[in-house]
Image (cartoon, grey):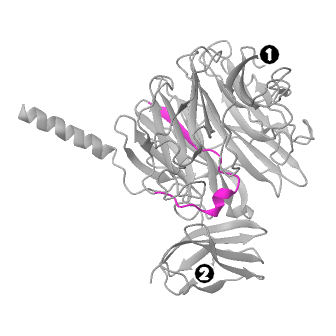
Amino acid sequence: MNKLFTTLLLCFFIAIQCFAQPTNINLSNTVYFGGEPYMAINPTNPKNIVVAWMADDISTSFRIAIKSKVSFDGGTTWSNQSIQPHFGTTWHSADVSMQFRSNGTLYLSYVDYHEAPDSGGVFITHSTNGGISWTPPTQIWNALTEDPSKRPLDRPWLSIDNSGGPNDGMFYITTKPAPWIAAPCRPYLKRSADSGQTWSTYRYVDTTNYLVGNLIAAPMGALTTTADGALCIAYPSYLSSQYIYPKYYLAKSYNHGASFQYHDLLVNPSIVSDPNYKLAYRLAANPSNPNQLAFAFVANTNGDPDIFLTSSNDGGASWNIPIRVNDDLTGNGKAQDMVWLNYDRNNKLVVTWRDRRNGSGTGFYQPSDTYCAVSINNGNTFKPNVRLNSIIAPFDSILEQSGNDFLSCELLNDTIYAAWGDVRSGNLNIYFSKTSDSLGTGTGIIKVDGNETKLFSLYPNPATTKLVITANNNPYKQIQLKIYNEQGQEVISRQFENAFQETTLDISQLSAGTYFISALANQQKIYNDKIIISK
């Protein structure tokens, strides 16, 4: 018995070691911005993982581009990055979405656009080698010719029917008007029956008696396809003549979106009024049970933003009372946002989000972590929350800007895979983690992309009285340098009218601690870094 006990104990500690969480390793190393990662796992080879995100790109004068990396060993090592092309000399990219077909072909959609003068569209590409290389993208939407006053090119979510039924192989894309377009706005849908080569004309997702209304400027359609081939889309509505309170509707179709059945998904949700929080929502379908759906969202029910989930066991006809997913103290002022969720094929459900429970204060301007929780009963209850990162990320002013509204997660057997953006390094970078559901511990956190060269170098760091800043590749004639303390307060600001190669800042008046330096050009932040001051 003693020998058996010793053997079992040894096996237990080996298991713990396999999932021990070492020092976090960053996956992206961008010089300023890398946000909104989207992750996909190959159904024909679960060790083939692809993460794509939007990031600043030095080669195009810091225009935002869609970058991706691929792993073939379950996330331990990663390929060199791929960059999707721009279709205009001054265009930016955004809003990447990916999904594998059941045969292992990976499809990726994204926005490429320019504002003022408006131009651009939604594009799709695919990879037959697990994300290593991509076909030339083709255009799905043209913002100048399709509903041109609304520019329908924002958040083009892609969903592919892999049900194996009569609708198998159908592609669907939802979009909404560009973010600078004022209400009234409506969500759009297109479909493709030939693997994205050609697409239908658009239709509105909402309709009479189930309209979005005239007050919602960004009515995102969150879509998924079910195990029996139904297309399901969740979207917001507020029209007092239609219903006195705001709602979320579920639109469901078995005929490729030609017609929909509409159901109340959520009635009179508690709205978070602070626009800094990332309040987007996510709909998911159980790939093993056509009756099970889940909808995750952020609400202010308890006096501060929390993560909530409501689920359906009858295909979306009715929905359970929402439950609070984050398990910190209720009403403690510790805000949660930026939610995502997914099902595994073994009927388990995982939810991930950004969490500020470990900050010293309350509200938006707090350090944050990334948390997750798993449910084995379709969201009726959740296991204890699991913290995915081992280093808390201090608040940085970059988080007040748009472009980091989402993170991503997948659940495969006992392993939770997650990708998110945080500012622990002084820049917004993309991190990847693998975590055991049963043990609640991870195999490490990796930064996705390590190919960028920083625009500026700082030395010494740690510093005491002076900080020397050297420009490695500075194309800007006018630059403003700002230094912030850990509370986000600006403590130093310097303006440079001509491009500089090197400058020295006097920091003798600053007390010991951690600070953040930013460089701005053309009113846009082009560089972020962290400084340690010791006295």
Name the one closer to the observer, 230 or 405. Answer: 405
Q: Which element is circle 2 on?
A: strand
**Residue 106 appearing in the image:** no
Residue 444 point in image, percent of width and height: 41, 50
Name the residue type under label 1. Answer: Ser
Instruction: Name which of mark 2 and mark 1 comes first in the sequence.
Output: 1
Residue 35 point in image, percent of width and height: 63, 52
Say which mark, if any, is on residue 469.
2
- Mark 2 neighbour class, 10 Å CA radius: few under 14, some 14 to 19, many 20 or more: some
- Mark 1 neighbour class, 10 Å CA radius: few under 14, some 14 to 19, many 20 or more: few
What quarter of the picture does the N terminus occupy? top left
> Quadrant of the rendered structure where residue 291 is?
top right
How many marks the image carries: the answer is 2
Residue 155 point in image, percent of width and height: 73, 40
| Left or right: 231, with 336 as reference point | right
Q: Give the residue at x 68% y 59%.
A: 56
Q: Which residue is mark 1?
A: 259
Name the one closer to the observer, 139 or 270. Answer: 270
Does the segment drawn in magenta span residue 144?
no
Q: Give the residue at x 44% y 84%.
A: 535
Name the residue type under label 2. Answer: Ile
Q: Give the residue at x 79% y 24%.
A: 243
> Quadrant of the rendered structure where residue 143 is?
top right
Magenta stretch: give its range. 392-412
Q: Compared with residue 111, is residue 520 higher up or lower down, i.e. above or below?
A: below
Name the one closer to the observer, 182 or 420. Answer: 182
Q: Give the number of the mark in front: 2 or 1.
A: 1
Q: Compared with residue 60, is residue 40 higher up or lower down, i.e. above or below?
A: above
| Left or right: 275, with 292 as reference point | right
